[in-house]
Amino acid sequence: MNNLLSIWELSKAQIEDYLALGAEVKKNRTKYLHVLEGKTLAMVFEKASTRTRVSFEAGMTQLGGHGIYFDFTTSQLSRGETIADTSKVLGRYVDVIMARLYKHTDLVEMAKHAGVPVINGLTDEEHPCQVLCDLLTMREKGKLKAGAKFAFVGDCAFNMANSLMLGCTKMGMEVALVYPKGYPPNIKYVKEARKYGKVEIYNDPVQGVKDADVVYTDVWISMGMEDEKAERMKAFGPFQVNDELMKHAKKDAIFMDCLPAHRGVEVTGDVMDGKQSVVWDEAENRLHIQKAIMLKLLGKA
Ligand code: CP
Ligand code: NVA
């Protein structure tokens, strides 16, 4: 079965295919109207979402199909029906499933039983849709170049950093992971990313972003980490992306963020709204890349 579960599983050529189709769908919106007519997407959410939910649903509408929002808490999953049984049933009703779950193993289980393509809408391990969108955005901004430096500042041990270090190295970029001591990146991902390119680690934010072409951050308290808030706020405090830190990146560096952002916490409002920020173009690209993903997995492009 054709799924999109992780950046880990994608080759550079497959990433290139998604990026090319994303760019094409963005340019020729009318060409793809009605292509998925009669098709249904189930959007399974165990965690909150703004961008993923709305871009998938709007994207499916724009392709002529229909999206169903399927909330864990109001489904029988909340009363003990298993992921496997739920997936078998959903696969009898819909053509494609997008799921945002805590455990990556639950997503793999879903893909095993669904009988239709499954898309990872974020797990604790990976966020492939976001990273395909980010790579498309970097390409549009002229930053997806061999040897360009991508600096991820903040929580390097979770989904965004995992997927980004793989996506960027596979596409030829050099990665700097910049994080406080005590919160090291997932060594499994670092080892894998190093098969494709350079991954350096820094505990000093200024050194980490030095001469970067792209500076990226994400929340310090990801969904599911709410209990760790106090200690994380303290540890990550010096790693805020602000104008002072941005001065150490290249003059024409761009600032990226998967969003949501907490202004004044991991990034200042000045950086978010500043000249180097591309976050709104980046958020828009979620829509185009989701459409490309659905078209590809349903064999329409
Ligand atoms: N970036 C992202 O996935 O946003 P949502 O959590 O709002 O879907
Ligand atoms: N790391 C964040 C990403 C949100 C899109 C989280 O998992 O909450």
Image: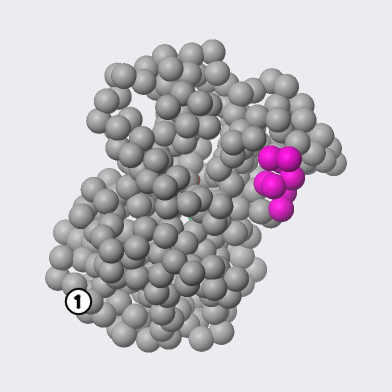
- Left or right: residue 87 compared with residue 32: right
- From the top left corner, tell me how far across and down residue 276 is, in percent: 20, 61
Q: Quadrant of the C terminus?
A: top left
Q: Quadrant of residue 89?
A: top right
Helix, strand or loop status at disc 1? loop
- From the top left corner, tell me how far across and down residue 215 is, in percent: 31, 67
In the image, is residue 106 part of the stretch drawn in magenta?
A: yes
Q: Nearer the viewer, residue 272 or 87?
A: 87
Residue stretch in magenta: 105-112
* Residue ID at (54%, 60%): 159
* Residue ID at (48%, 41%): 52
User: What residue did someone put label 1 on?
Assistant: 247
* As drawn, 134 above or below 37: below
Secondary structure character of the magenta stretch overall: helix
- Left or right: residue 238 compared with residue 121: left
* As drawn, 65 above or below 157: above
Q: Nearer the viewer, residue 7 or 90?
A: 7
* As drawn, 232 above or below 12: below
